[in-house]
Image: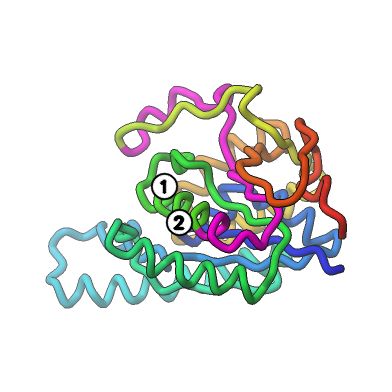
Amino acid sequence: MQRKILAIFAHPDDEAFGPAGTLAKYAAEGTEIHLLCATKGEVGQWYNKDKSLKDDEKRQDKIKLENVREKELLSSAHALEIKKVEFLGFIDGELRNNIYHKVAEKIIKKIEDFKPQIVVTVERRGVSGHLDHIAISMITTYSFLKTKMAQKLYYHCLPKKYRDKMMNEYFVYFPEGYKENEITTRIDYSEYFDKKVASMQAHQSQIADVNNLLSRFKKWPKVDHFILQYVNGLTPQIPETDLFSGIKV
Ligand SMILES: [Zn+2]
């Protein structure tokens, strides 16, 4: 049976700054990976940089950024050998309560059509604390539990030991990260680090974040960390070093 992973994120670049190394590893080993991206990251630096822009000019700028970031995600996915990218068509910064079920409907349909064994998203504090990340984590969890089709739901997370003081300057509050005993699954992607770098560098419109994070990823061990949050029909052996452990495929 074909191994399949469905990765679900809020913005273009969440895959690159998140578990890109793991996705590249599994794709290279023959797993079919599809990526759902809820928004096109329209609310980026381009949109906000010039406060003197009039409203219609801002709209134009936003459309430009949306197009650029869509292409950047496709190019990142190409570097990682992700087979298919689908945009769910929601707006960056607007994943709010009133549309949770509209987003869930699309994710549920994708799970039913694609039938992945594994679903991957971000942990419930959204790694960086971005509200869109928190929303996509919750909506993905709801969709996983509702469909009961995939066998494992993973949250990508940042270990507490990697959360450095520089992160205090990011947004308002950067969540503290997870303790070693909270992390269930570690995936070594050292052989695929160059692919993670290519995926990150595909996001040129976000180059400041890319360079900032790349300096960290170069120092850190080439390991992605996950929390196995829910399983269907199997008994996990924790800790794990393979997303597919316990799954008969
Ligand atoms: Zn994001």
Report the front residue among 58 and 15.
Answer: 15
> Which secondary structure, mark 2?
helix
Q: Is residue 10 above or below residue 168?
A: below
> Which secondary structure, mark 1?
helix
Task: Give the crowd class for mark 1: few <14, some 14-19, many >=20 residues within 10 Å.
Answer: many
Residue 169 relative to residue 109: left or right? left
Q: Amino acid at mark 2?
A: Ile
Q: Quadrant of the C terminus?
A: bottom right
Find the magenta span and give its range: 143-171
Q: Nearer the viewer, mark 2 or mark 1?
A: 2
Count of numbered circles on the image: 2
**Residue drawn at (33%, 57%), measured in percent from left and top?**
45
Q: What percent of the width, then of the height, locates residue 123?
A: 52, 42
Which label is found at residue 139? 2
**Residue drawn at (60%, 66%), measured in percent from left and top?**
35
The residue at label 1 has a CB less than 8 Å from ligand 1? no
Q: What percent of the width, then of the height, locates residue 106?
A: 48, 72
- Whether residue 75 appears in magenta in the rendering, the answer is no
Which label is found at residue 96? none
**Residue drawn at (74%, 47%), measured in percent from left and top?**
193
Q: Amino acid at mark 1?
A: Ile
Which label is found at residue 134? 1
Q: What percent of the width, then of the height, locates residue 149?
A: 66, 62
Q: CA distance from mark 2 to mark 1?
A: 9 Å
Q: Quadrant of the N terminus?
A: bottom right
Residue 162 relative to residue 124: left or right? right
Q: Name the N-terminal-most of marks 2 and 1.
A: 1
Task: Give the crowd class for mark 2: few <14, some 14-19, many >=20 residues within 10 Å.
Answer: many
Residue 230 relative to residue 151: left or right? left
